[in-house]
Image (cartoon, rainbow, N blue to C red):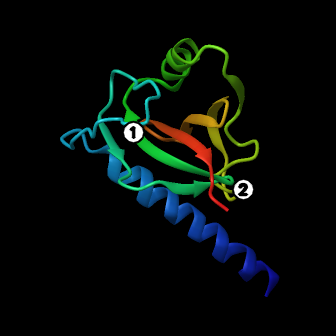
Amino acid sequence: MLAMRIKVPAIAGVLTLCFIVLPMSSPAADVDQNTTGLPTYPHLRRAMMDSVSRNTLGHQCTHFAADSGDPLEIVEAWYRKAVPGAVESDVNQDSIYGSYFRLTGIKLTKGSDFLTVYRIADGTSTSIELFKCWEASK
């Protein structure tokens, strides 16, 4: 019974990530404008700007999600230069994606804003997520 309780959330987490990332891999898809004010990587295949803010890690955040065919290391290096003074950590540390699977990549934090650049194991695209945040109302 315990094994079943562990497998169901793990499967749900993987499926959720697949629904977020996999539909973004179509090269013919549109690229939404990034309105977060955070830097936009120049070589995107697809991007989506959320229409409403959401509560993320105790802050209210606008969210921009994109993917690129460029190698992970290239995108990471670009964001390290584009966000000077950001604190870098492993994308799996205090992960917003849960502990159901491991990603390869980085999280850059500056003030209450943060971004993640990562790849799923055996993935063919690099995922980019930008979060422009402010204190959530109480």
- Of badges 2 and 1, nearer the viewer stands 1
Q: Nearer the viewer, residue 138 or 33?
A: 138
Give left or right: position of 64 versus 25.
right
- Residue most extreme to the bottom: 1
Give left or right: position of 19 versus 107.
left
The kind of residue tagged 2 is: Ser
Which residue shows up at 47% across the image and 28% down it?
A: 38
Location of the N terminus (image quadrant): bottom right
User: Callout 1: 10 Å neighbours few (<14), some, many (20+)?
Assistant: many
User: Callout 2: 10 Å neighbours few (<14), some, many (20+)?
Assistant: few
Whichever of labels 2 and 1 marks the residue nearer the N terminus, that label is 1
Give left or right: position of 15 versus 65.
right
| Whether residue 29 is visible | yes
Residue identifier under label 1:
66
* Disc ID at residue 99: 2
| Whether residue 120 is visible | no
The kind of residue tagged 1 is: Ala
Classify residue 19 by image quadrant: bottom left
2 versus 106 height, above or below? below
Which residue shows up at 29% across the image and 34% down it?
A: 45
**Residue 48 in the image, given as x and y percentages of width and height:** 34, 46
Q: Are marks 2 and 1 in contact (CB under 8 Å)?
A: no
Classify residue 51 by image quadrant: bottom left
89 versus 101 height, above or below? above
**Residue 113 in the image, given as x and y percentages of width and height:** 60, 35
* Kind of element beneath mark 1: strand
Q: Give the distance between the C-alpha atoms of the residues marked 2 and 1, in whole angstroms.
A: 22 Å
Q: Nearer the viewer, residue 79 or 104?
A: 79
* Kind of element beneath mark 2: loop
Location of the C terminus (image quadrant): bottom right
